[in-house]
Image (tube, rainbow, N blue to C red):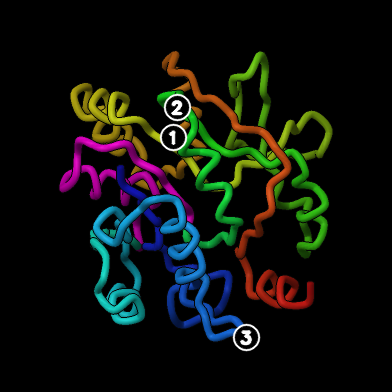
């Protein structure tokens, strides 16, 4: 098993001059170090953790003391998460993959929850998301469609204009089984979709899979987590 933390992006909306996963909290820890600690509580060793880097990757390696595996997305400024994941798959293939966004903070128990999933593709969905979202400035501008029916995701990723009809919020913690990863590689699924759209993000990739009859299973529950898109998100989190 491998845990992949997607930390290649510029994070331009934060205004920070360094990767936002290196934001340092009052206790001296970084966002990245908190999440690595939580991942390691559920059986992941240093060699099991892959940091998919890009923007100022050397800072991430320095901050983490070069303890983990690192795969750099050299095209980070022109691509997105799925491109970074594909770069990882070029080096490491035969594993269950647990994908974590680098700009979230979450309880360690969420790692345990998704590790228990027996599905080939599963992702954590927050059923109590709206209360958190209302802490964000202009939160109505950051709504995403998500529709669940009979324990499967039917739609996700597309911008939504209203809250009604949204069945939860994609958290940024997703599992792909070894079996499904082999299919991705054999059928050149990632390679083909990246030819069409190098900037595709993970939610839209999952929607792409759904459209091609892959089943994506939600793990829907009340989740303790927080997402950092803008600098105000850090300030609001610290005020809590």
Q: Residue at x 61, y 41 (%)?
A: 170
Q: Is residue 126 left or right of residue 123?
A: right
Q: Is residue 184 magenta?
A: no
Q: Report which quarter residue 190 is drawn in.
A: top left
Magenta stretch, residue numbers? 77-101
Q: Is residue 91 magenta?
A: yes
Which residue occupies the foreground of this view, 192 or 213? 213
Rendered-image quadrant of the C terminus: bottom right
Query: CA–CA distance between discs 2 and 3?
Result: 40 Å
Estimate the x, y position of residue 62 in percent, counting from the top left: 30, 81
Looking at the image, residue 2 lies above or below residue 151: below
Residue annotated with mark 1: 205
**Secondary structure found at label 1:** helix
Residue annotated with mark 2: 208
Q: Is residue 109 left or right of residue 197?
A: right
Q: Is residue 213 left or right of residue 89?
A: right
Q: Report which quarter residue 128 is drawn in.
A: top right
């Amino acid at each position: 098993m491998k845990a992949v933390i997607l930390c290649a992006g510029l994070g331009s909306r934060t205004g920070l001059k360094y990767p936002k996963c290196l934001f340092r909290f009052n206790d001296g820890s970084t966002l990245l170090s908190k999440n690595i600690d939580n991942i390691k509580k559920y059986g992941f060793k240093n060699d099991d953790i892959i940091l998919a880097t890009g923007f100022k990757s050397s800072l991430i390696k320095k901050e983490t003391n070069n303890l983990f595996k690192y795969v750099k997305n050299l095209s980070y400024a022109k691509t997105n998460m799925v491109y970074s994941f594909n770069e990882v798959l070029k080096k490491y293939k035969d594993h269950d993959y647990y994908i974590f966004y680098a700009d979230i903070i979450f309880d360690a128990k969420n790692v345990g929850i998704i590790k228990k999933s027996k599905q080939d593709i599963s992702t954590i969905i927050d059923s109590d998301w709206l209360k958190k979202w209302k802490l964000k400035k202009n939160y109505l501008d950051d709504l995403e469609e998500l529709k669940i029916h009979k324990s499967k995701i039917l739609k996700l990723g597309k911008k939504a204009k209203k809250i009604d009809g949204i069945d939860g919020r994609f958290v940024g913690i997703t599992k792909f089984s070894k079996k499904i990863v082999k299919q991705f590689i054999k059928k050149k699924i990632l390679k083909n979709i990246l030819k069409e759209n190098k900037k595709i993000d993970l939610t839209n990739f999952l929607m792409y899979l759904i459209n091609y009859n892959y089943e994506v299973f939600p793990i829907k529950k009340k989740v303790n987590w927080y997402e950092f898109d803008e600098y105000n998100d850090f300030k609001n989190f610290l005020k809590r």
